[in-house]
Amino acid sequence: MNTLIFRTIGPFLVAIMLVFSVFVTLRGHNEPGGGFIGGLIAASAIAIYGMSSGVATVRRALRVNPIAIAGAGAALSGIAGFASLAFEAPFMTGLWAIAEIGGYEINVSSPMVFDIGVYLVVLGTISAVALALEDDGGED
C-alpha cells in the first residue's frame, strides 16, 4: 500500500478524518454520533497514516503509548459516571456546569466528558492493535 499517490494523499485524508471525528463526537448528544463512532473514525485515520507513512512515523506523531490513551479514556469515563454520586444523584446522571477558561465561558456536561472518554478508549485500543499488526507485518 506504499504508493506515491497514497503517500501524497494520506496526510490530507488523515487531517480531514481527525477533524470529522471530533465533530461527530461533539455533536453526538443531539444527532447521530458520539464517542464510539468518533473514536472509530479517528482510529481509522491513524491506521491510514500508518499505512501511508509507516509505523515509526505514527509512533513519533502519537508521542504516547496507545494503551495509555485507552487507560486515560477509561478513567475519564469512570470519573464522568461516578461524578453524579458526589452530588447524591443516581449513577450516570447528567451534570452540567459552566467553566471559565481564558476568559471564555464553556458549557461542560458529564455526558460530554463520558463521550470524550469513550472516544479515547476506542482510539487507544484500536490504534494499539493496528500498530501491533503493522509492526508484525501482518504475518502469522
Image: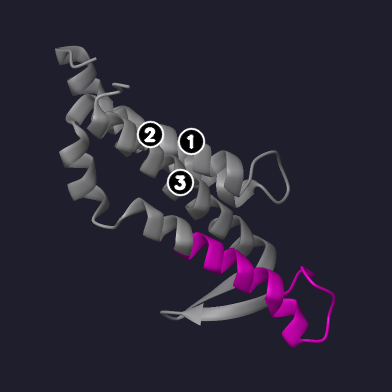
Residue lying farthest to the front in this orientation: 140
Q: CA distance from mark 2 to mark 3?
A: 14 Å
The answer to whether residue 16 is visible is no
Mark 1, secondary structure of its residue: helix
**Left or right: 30 in relation to 105:** right
Q: Quadrant of residue 126?
A: top left
Q: Callout 1, which amino acid?
A: Ile
**Left or right: 131 in relation to 113:** left
Identify the residue position indicated by label 3 in the image.
125
Please name which of the two marks, 3 or 1, marks the residue nearer to the observer.
3
Q: Nearer the viewer, residue 16 or 39?
A: 39
Q: Relative to 5, say whether 50 is above or below.
A: below
Placement of the C terminus among the 4 image quadrants? top left
Identify the residue position indicated by label 1 in the image.
41
For image coordinates 51% across by 53% down, the residue present is: 121
**What color scheme is it?**
one colour
- The image position of residue 113, as x and y in percent, is 59, 65
Mark 3, secondary structure of its residue: helix
Q: Earlier in the sequence, mark 3 or mark 1?
A: 1
- The image position of residue 65, as x and y in percent, is 31, 55
Identify the residue position indicated by label 2 in the image.
45
* Magenta run includes residue 93: yes
* Magenta run includes residue 65: no
Q: Please rate how many residues cluster around mark 3, counting C-alpha atoms within 10 Å: few if below 14, some from 14 to 19, many from 20.
A: some
Tell me where the magenta segment starts and ends, as one range.
Answer: 72-95
Mark 2 in CB contact with mark 3 (< 8 angstroms): no
Mark 2 in CB contact with mark 1 (< 8 angstroms): yes
Mark 2, secondary structure of its residue: helix
